[in-house]
Image (cartoon, grey):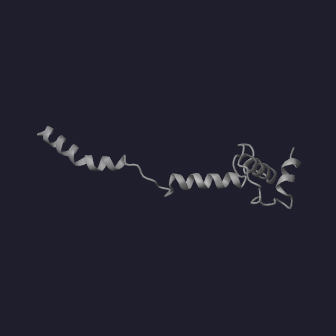
C-alpha cells in the first residue's frame, strides 16, 4: 500500500516539478534587444567603464565615444559635447 501511495504522489507531483525547471524570461527582453541596448551604450561612451571609475567621468565617456567612432568607422556626428568640451578635445585633455 505504501508503494502505491508513493507512486501516486510521484505521478501527481511530476507536472508541478516540470514547471519549476521551465525557463522563463522575467525581464521580457529578447537577446536582440539586449544586444541593441549594449551597442547603444557603447556608442554613447558608457561602456566600458573600469570598476574603480563607475559611474564613468565625462572625460572617460568622451574618450569611449572617440574610440567607438574609430573602431566602427563613424564620423562621430552623434557624439554629444560633454560639459561644453567637444568629444575629441575631452579625450586628449584627460591624458
**Viewer-proximal residue among 57 and 11:** 57
* Nearest the eye: 22 or 47: 47
Left or right, residue 29 beside residue 79: left
In the rendering, at what x and y percent does residue 50 appear?
72, 43
Of 51 and 49, the residue lying toward us: 49
In the rendering, at what x and y percent does residue 3 appear?
14, 38
Query: Which residue sits at x=47%, y=55%?
Result: 26
| Residue at point 65%, 55% (across, down) | 40
Q: Which residue is drawn at the image coordinates 72% and 46% (left, top)?
A: 71
Residue 22, percent from left and from top: 37, 48
Lateral position of residue 91 relative to residue 35, left or right: right
* Relative to 37, 45 lies left or right: right
If the image is split into quadrants, where does the C terminus sit? top right
Residue 23 at x, y = what percent?
40, 49
* Residue located farthest toward the left when viewing the structure as drawn: 1
Check the picture and name the quadrant holding the N terminus. Answer: top left
Amino acid at each position: 500500500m505504501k508503494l502505491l501511495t508513493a507512486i501516486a504522489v510521484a505521478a501527481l507531483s511530476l507536472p508541478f516539478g516540470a514547471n519549476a525547471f521551465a525557463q522563463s524570461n522575467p525581464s521580457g527582453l529578447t537577446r536582440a534587444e539586449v544586444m541593441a541596448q549594449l551597442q547603444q551604450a557603447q556608442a554613447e561612451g558608457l561602456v566600458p567603464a573600469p570598476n574603480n571609475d563607475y559611474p564613468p567621468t565625462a572625460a572617460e565617456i568622451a574618450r569611449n565615444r572617440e574610440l567607438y567612432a574609430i573602431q566602427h568607422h563613424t564620423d562621430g556626428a552623434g557624439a554629444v559635447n560633454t560639459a561644453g568640451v567637444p568629444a575629441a578635445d575631452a579625450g586628449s585633455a584627460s591624458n
